[in-house]
Image (cartoon, rainbow, N blue to C red):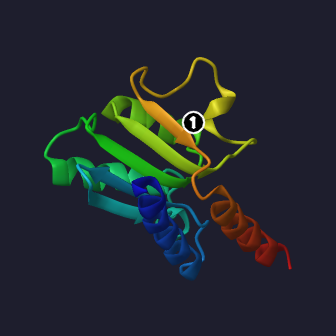
Amino acid sequence: MDDIKFMGEALREARRAVQMDEVPVGAVIVHKGRIIARAHNYTERLNDATAHAEMQAVTMATSAFGGKYLNECTIYVTVEPCPMCAAALNWTQIGRVVYGAADPKRGYTLFSPSLLHPKTEVTAGVLADECSVLMRDFFKSKRD
């Protein structure tokens, strides 16, 4: 299934984030079965609170796609987007959001109505266990 394949690519990005001592969130944006952007968190490296994986991927995708609208694209992200990222995805009118682990403390689903574009489709829980373990292990290592 494509969702598992592309979430696997997002997980690969999240693992790169761990190697850089960044919070392990990875994202890929896909258009017609082809990855047009891949990114992970850069908040520590850039000293920029807005440098989330989704924001980095959107910047790359709009450049590669040649426009600000991504309504024919799907973003795969390892963790539920935060409100900032969901709002940015709204502005791009992204066609679909697929995420792995839920974020009950900081995820966009805490807000009603949704911060995503009304036409955006959402699929949650793809490879959720793998995504959750990566986050849990990262923060456990920080506490130890």
Which of 13 and 91 lies nearest the eye of the viewer? 13
Looking at the image, which residue is at 77% across and 75% down?
142
Left/right placement of residue 80 relative to residue 45 reads right
> Which image quarter is the C terminus in?
bottom right
Position of residue 52 relative to residue 39, above or below, is above
Looking at the image, which residue is at 55% across and 68% down?
44
Position of residue 91 relative to residue 62, above or below, is above
Where does label 1 land, which residue?
83
Which of 34 and 21 lies nearest the eye of the viewer? 34
The answer to whether any part of residue 40 appears in the image is no
Looking at the image, which residue is at 34% across and 34% down?
95
The quadrant in which residue 72 appears is top left
Q: Residues within 10 Å of mark 1 (few under 14, many from 20)?
A: some
> Where in the figure is residue 47, as x and y percent of width and height?
52, 64
Which of 78 and 51 lies nearest the eye of the viewer? 78
Q: Amino acid at mark 1?
A: Pro
Left/right placement of residue 133 relative to residue 88 reads right
> Where in the figure is residue 66, as x and y percent of width and height?
13, 46
> Which image quarter is the N terminus in?
bottom left
Disc 1, SS: helix
Which of 64 and 125 lies nearest the eye of the viewer? 125
The answer to whether any part of residue 112 appears in the image is yes
Q: Name the residue furthest right.
A: 144
